[in-house]
Amino acid sequence: MARAATTSDAFNAVAEPRRREILNYLVLQERPVGEIVDALEMEQPSVSKHLRVLKDVGLVHVRREGRQMFYRTNAEAIRPLHEWTETFERYWQQQLIRVKERAEENQDR
Amino acid sequence: MATKHSQDHSPDQLSATLAALADPTRRGILAHLMSGEASVTKLAEPFEMSMAAISKHLKVLEQAGLISRGRAAQWRPCRIKAAPLKEVSDWVENYRMAWEKRLDRLHDYLADVQAKEKKHGRTTFKGGHK
């Protein structure tokens, strides 16, 4: 049961350096597949495979225009990732404060 | 950057961290550990899972370097290791900022178009009158 969740999980979709590269490239503007292939110097089948994973979790949207497929990023889909990192950031800030307090205590001695 | 040789067996830390996070149970475990160290029994409580299943998740987290487990105490407390998680947080934040920048550019563009339309009067074609 824990296994089935991973492929449809946004974290899994971005757990691949090439897919993060594609997202970072598409975040600037919508692009046809061919341009992604050229710009990132990747094989077309590999790009298509990565795009499918990103599309399945909603991180990218696709639109057909004639014979070309255009891909763009979808800001909404990053929300589950962002919500988790917000929780983490609160924890991280607390830790920083704690470290600082401890350092100050040591200085006072 | 990473050589072809190392790519096959050891993904970069960020990818490994994200892969370990790609499971709601493991994210739940980490969220719990943010409030302090805990035993396996304690961590298993909110989940309807066997101890064996929880242990498996803990092993994944440990291998990804996201938790450490105490050796001294018999109950082997789990503790969160935050540094790799900060990397994830930074990546998400950068990605979001890139998005917002793009939206800003779009707003600027639209404002520009509107300004130009105003300047040139009603240049948009409304209806069919000539």
Image (cartoon, coloured by chain):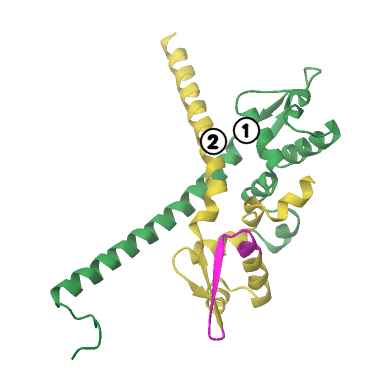
Chain colours: A yellow, B green
- Count neighbours of disc 2 (C-alpha within 10 A) and say few if under 14, some if 14 to 19, many if 20 or more: few
Image quarter for residue B98? Answer: bottom left
The verdict on residue A93 being magenta is no
Q: Are marks 1 and 2 in contact (CB under 8 Å)?
A: yes
Q: Residue furthest bottom?
A: B130
Identify the amino acid type marked 1: Ala
- Using the image, determine if residue B92 lies above or below residue A20: above
The answer to whether tags 1 and 2 share a subunit is no
Residue at left offset 17%, top offset 78%: B122
Foreground of the two, A54 or B5: A54
Disc 2 target residue: A87
Q: Is residue B26 above or below residue A91?
A: below
For the point 28% across and 63% down, the residue is B108
The spot of residue B50 in percent (x, y) is 84, 33
Q: Over which residues does the magenta segment extend?
A: A53-67
* In this rendering, position of residue B57 left or right of residue B101: right
Q: Chain of mark 2?
A: A
Distance from disc 1 to disc 2, alpha carbons, whole Å, reads: 8 Å
Q: Camera-side residue: A106 or A93? A: A93
Q: Is residue A67 visible?
A: yes
- Where is mark 1, residue-wise? B31
Using the image, determine if residue B49 lies above or below residue A76.
above
Disc 2 residue type (three-letter): Thr
Any magenta on residue A54? yes
SS at mark 1 in the image: helix
Report helix, strand or loop for mark 2: helix
- Which x, y percent locates residue B15? 65, 51
- Label at residue B118: none
